[in-house]
Image: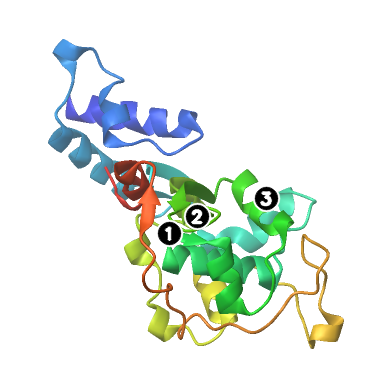
Amino acid sequence: MEAGLVQILEGALLAAGEPLSVQRMALLFEENDRPSKEEIRAAIQSVEERCEDRGYELVQVASGYRFQVRQDLATWVGRLWQERPARYSRALMETLSLIAYRQPITRGEIEEIRGVAVSTNIIKTLLEREWVRVVGHRDVPGRPAMYATTRQFLDYFNLKSLDQLPPLAEIKELDNLSGELGLELPEQTSDADAEPDEGGEASQSETAMEDAATPDGEQPELEDADDAQQDSRTD
């Protein structure tokens, strides 16, 4: 059954259009003919080996496994689409980075660290892309929402878990982080020349993540603690 299993999983991965976890792969089979998780993982290894000399590879991300074009072919494959790759303002990237490294974190805490207001449209964009979500409310006056990253965030940036983010101590500039995550930032020479971010404000270049800390004495109130942690786990 092993050769058949490899072909079945290969076909499912090609057809799915999204990452497949080991559990979802197991559900492709009738209960009395269902392979074990160990057999599925062995077959996945075979599928991965088949991709070694091809233009695509099998990658494991937070939600499971998926086929994707090798990154070193992006220059040529990207020409299939006429639209330009998305370019993100420094303000949006700084906000996303703070959420990723300091989660759960409130908008006010982000503003305190950055030293400038966070545009409502930046939060809206991150929520609409499903890169972040509300995981609870801080138990302080006003009960501000607390934000954390999602599985979609991990999947988009080819991460299996938050542990794969580059250590904060190694990141001296935002440009270094964008390189690690394969992002494209708009070129900026000064604040005066900065492109407006999604909220119409000029993007700020200051980044103070290394010196940042969540204010003491505030205990987060999570709506679902187990759900808040699941985005950093793998199947």
Cβ atoms at labels 2 and 1 below 8 Å apart? yes
Residue situated furthest front in the rendering: 141
- In front of the other: 85 or 13: 85
Residue type at mark 2?
Tyr
Q: CA distance from mark 3 to mark 1?
A: 17 Å
Q: CA distance from mark 2 to mark 3?
A: 12 Å
In this figure, which residue is indicated by the disc labeled 2?
147
Cβ atoms at labels 2 and 3 below 8 Å apart? no
Q: Earlier in the sequence, mark 2 or mark 1?
A: 1
Q: CA distance from mark 2 to mark 1?
A: 5 Å
Q: From this viewpoint, is residue 230 visible?
A: yes
Q: Quadrant of the C terminus?
A: top left
Report which quarter residue 95 is drawn in: bottom right
Above or below: residue 11 compared with residue 175: above
For residue 109, side relative to residue 222 (left or right): right
For residue 126, side relative to residue 189 (left or right): left
Which SS class for mark 2?
A: strand
Q: Earlier in the sequence, mark 3 or mark 1?
A: 1
Residue type at mark 1?
Pro
Residue type at mark 3?
Lys
Residue 192, position in %: x, y? 86, 85
